[in-house]
Amino acid sequence: MKRVITYGTFDLLHYGHINLLRRAKAQGDYLIVALSTDEFNWKEKQKRCYFSYEERKMLLESIRYVDLVIPESKWEQKRTDIHEYHVDTFVMGDDWEGKFDFLEEEGAEVIYLPRTPEISSTQIKSDLKNKTASARKDIS
């Protein structure tokens, strides 16, 4: 069985996330998603999530491409996850191109998949903020 792993926050789940998970699963037989914990997101990424870790985990577990969701609590765990979960392939979006090539030393193939260009969680948050601001002006 070929095992694949990917990492992310997966907040405000959208079709770009689903595309990434579908294409990651296509790289093997079993897809593991390391989901950033709320603490990790805040301390290391300065990100505050709309959905809690448990809510994001539940959403990911309901996607047919995802076989296992594990917590991501520190940057350094990627090396140990490769061994602990017997991972063959490490997959990330191409905005991380080159950043995880060192995992090939751990025996994993590293693949960077193109992002879905017209969608991102950051864009959704920005659009919602702008729509809210615009709606407030219309009310005034």
Image (cartoon, rainbow, N blue to C red):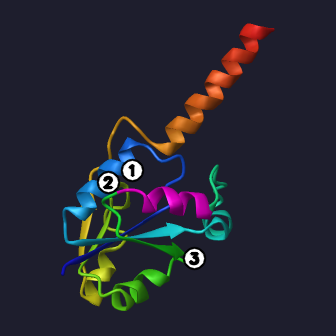
Amino acid of disc 1: His
| Mark 1 or 3, nearer chain start | 1
Q: Which residues are magenta?
A: 53-63
* CA distance separating discs 1 and 3: 20 Å
Disc assigned to residue 132: none
Mark 1 is surrounded, within 10 Å at the Cα level, by few (under 14), some (14 to 19) or many (20 or more) other residues, namely many
**Helix, strand, or loop for circle 3?**
loop
Dot 2 corresponds to which residue?
20
* CA distance separating discs 1 and 2: 5 Å
| Above or below, 96 relative to 103 | above
Q: Are marks 1 and 2 in contact (CB under 8 Å)?
A: yes
| Mark 2 or 3, nearer chain start | 2
Q: Are marks 2 and 3 in contact (CB under 8 Å)?
A: no
| Above or below, 93 relative to 36 | above
Residue 32 figure quarter = bottom left
As for residue 55 lying within the magenta part, the answer is: yes
Mark 3 is surrounded, within 10 Å at the Cα level, by few (under 14), some (14 to 19) or many (20 or more) other residues, namely some
Mark 2 is surrounded, within 10 Å at the Cα level, by few (under 14), some (14 to 19) or many (20 or more) other residues, namely many
Rendered residue at 63%/53% (across/down): 49
Dot 1 corresponds to which residue?
17
- Residue 29 vs residue 98: left or right? left
**Helix, strand, or loop for circle 1?**
helix
